[in-house]
């Protein structure tokens, strides 16, 4: 392969060859534009680079045939990826950059690559070496609008390596300062940047009343037993926009209620650091109850009241509903011998449950101590203090730190389990004395959660002959 090192000679050679062949077409340029941090998908930064790049290509008498756009893409941050040979490594991930180099090396689509500036082109030495390899082996130029990039000479390559090394160190210095700044903000309970948290303004400080009302409603309904899917469907049916302005999803609803920010808690890398300096939308106790509920396995979302709740009296398997036939049937393939009409069974179980709720005594139900949340908060802060003290004194025995943290983590876990243990009582307490009309207005997920928390339903063989509904074949016992 003939290697041409001078970018001007490449363009001249192509023009001369085109003239000899009777084709005076200009050099085909690709244009790579990049900006590291475009807030809210702002396109102005790359837009300005594109405008200047097109002007420079036109000045050189070429045609821009392809645009490679990297909006809000870092040329410094590395991620762990799996290499083609199966090994794991930390690399800067830039698909458009790789596509541009591939197209330039191939030469079928573009003859040259224009970038705005060396700093916009690469900040990782490994990426620069890959670009140098393409420029040298393919003999095709990589130029910049600002004139800071010249990979056509040994001197230009040396300068590029020096400048990228300096830019890389500058990025490392900036990263270190930013990380320290975030630690300081976390310790002071101040919010950092990032996407807007639902319920708050873009600075994550001022509460938006309408959105706060939605969060409190979701928390109340979730603690009352309503499922995630039901909440998502209701929000989208009512046309309430998510933080992004679009539709809600399971993950977006979960993230809103599980976000420590709504409880006025400042965290850093998942660890609580301080009380937030902003107004909480949910009190600490309610938020901890939501966390505890998330850790408790609830009956899966189903279409019928007793699907997965009622059990077969012969094999102990669960019942599944058949809408086309209006029946429940044992879902165990080895059995499947017991069926019941859906409506009579639902009505019977509903009547028993409402009757039990009419005078339900929850005095013996484990409840959370009033100071549990305060104890969790105090232990969490003590844990953070232990980590900070260990770092300040330069502790060199990680086992000592692990032992101290293990003891504190054990105490925190025990308190959180106590909180989770009282969830059944809180769920049922919200429905004591409920009327049939009120019961019918509850979401199906809530009714299923109440039934599963209150009773165990077992369906056995019914009497022989034509029996409309054999009550004696259904056993309902307290859960």
Image (cartoon, rainbow, N blue to C red):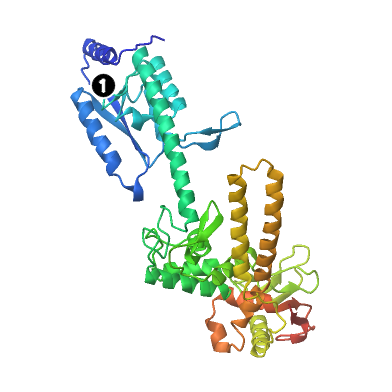
SS state under label 1: loop
363 left or right of 281 in image: right
Q: Quadrant of the N terminus?
A: top left
Residue placed at 57% from the left, 71% from the top? 285
Residue 314 appears left or right of 58: right
Q: Quadrant of the C terminus?
A: bottom right
Please name the residue shown 77% across and 71% down the image. 337
Q: Is residue 94 visible?
A: no
The residue beneath circle 1 is: 27
Residue 178 rendering spot, x and y as whole percentages? 44, 44
Q: Closer to the camera, 180 or 117?
A: 180
From this view, report whether residue 98 is shown above or below residue 394: above
Q: For the residue carrying disc 1, how many other residues have a C-alpha within 10 Å: few (<14), some (14-19), or many (20+)?
A: many
Give residue 227's quadrant in the image. Answer: bottom right
Q: Position of residue 328 (x, y in %)?
A: 67, 73
Q: Position of residue 209 (x, y in %)?
A: 38, 71
> In the rendering, at what x and y percent does residue 3 appear?
38, 11
């Amino acid at each position: 392969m003939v290697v041409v090192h001078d970018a001007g000679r490449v363009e001249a050679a192509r023009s001369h060859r085109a003239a000899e062949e009777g084709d005076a077409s200009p050099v085909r340029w690709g244009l790579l534009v990049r900006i590291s941090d475009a807030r809210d998908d702002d396109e102005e930064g790359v837009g300005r680079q594109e405008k200047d790049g097109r002007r420079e290509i036109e000045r050189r008498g070429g045609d821009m045939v392809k645009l490679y756009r990297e909006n809000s893409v870092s040329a410094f941050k590395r991620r762990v990826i799996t290499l083609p040979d199966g090994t794991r490594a930390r690399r800067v991930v830039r698909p458009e950059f790789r596509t541009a180099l591939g197209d330039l090396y191939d030469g079928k689509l573009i003859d040259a690559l224009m970038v705005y500036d060396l700093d916009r082109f690469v900040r990782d030495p490994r990426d620069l070496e890959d670009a140098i390899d393409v420029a040298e082996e393919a003999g095709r130029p990589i130029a910049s609008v600002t004139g800071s990039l010249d990979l056509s000479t040994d001197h230009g390559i040396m300068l590029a390596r020096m400048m990228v090394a300096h830019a890389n160190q500058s990025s490392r210095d900036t990263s270190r300062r930013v990380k320290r700044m975030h630690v300081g903000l976390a310790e002071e309970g101040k919010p950092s940047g990032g996407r807007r948290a639902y319920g708050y303004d873009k600075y994550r400080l001022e509460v938006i009343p309408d959105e706060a009302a939605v969060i409190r409603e979701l928390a109340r309904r979730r603690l009352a037993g309503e499922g995630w899917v039901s909440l998502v469907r209701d929000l989208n049916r009512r046309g309430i926009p998510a933080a992004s302005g679009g539709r809600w999803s399971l993950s977006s609803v979960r993230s809103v209620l599980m976000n420590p920010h709504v409880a006025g808690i400042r965290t850093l890398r998942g660890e609580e650091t301080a009380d937030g300096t902003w107004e909480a939308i949910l009190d600490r106790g309610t938020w901890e109850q939501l966390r505890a509920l998330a850790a408790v396995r609830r009956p899966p979302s189903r279409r019928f009241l007793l699907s997965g709740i009622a059990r077969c009296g012969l094999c102990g398997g669960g019942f599944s509903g058949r809408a086309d036939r209006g029946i429940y049937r044992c879902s165990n393939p080895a059995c499947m011998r017991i069926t019941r009409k859906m409506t009579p069974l639902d009505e019977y179980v509903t009547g028993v449950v409402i009757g039990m709720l009419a005078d339900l005594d929850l005095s013996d139900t484990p409840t959370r101590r009033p100071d549990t949340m305060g104890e969790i908060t105090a232990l969490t802060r003590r844990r953070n203090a232990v980590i900070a003290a260990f770092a300040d004194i330069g502790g060199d025995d990680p086992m000592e730190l692990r032992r101290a943290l293990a003891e504190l983590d054990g105490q925190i876990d025990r308190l959180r389990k106590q909180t989770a243990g009282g969830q059944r009582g809180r769920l049922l307490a919200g429905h004591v004395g409920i009327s049939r009309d009120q019961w019918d207005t509850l979401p199906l997920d809530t009714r299923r959660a109440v039934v599963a928390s209150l009773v165990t339903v077992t369906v056995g063989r019914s009497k022989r002959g034509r029996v409309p509904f054999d009550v004696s074949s259904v056993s309902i016992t307290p859960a």
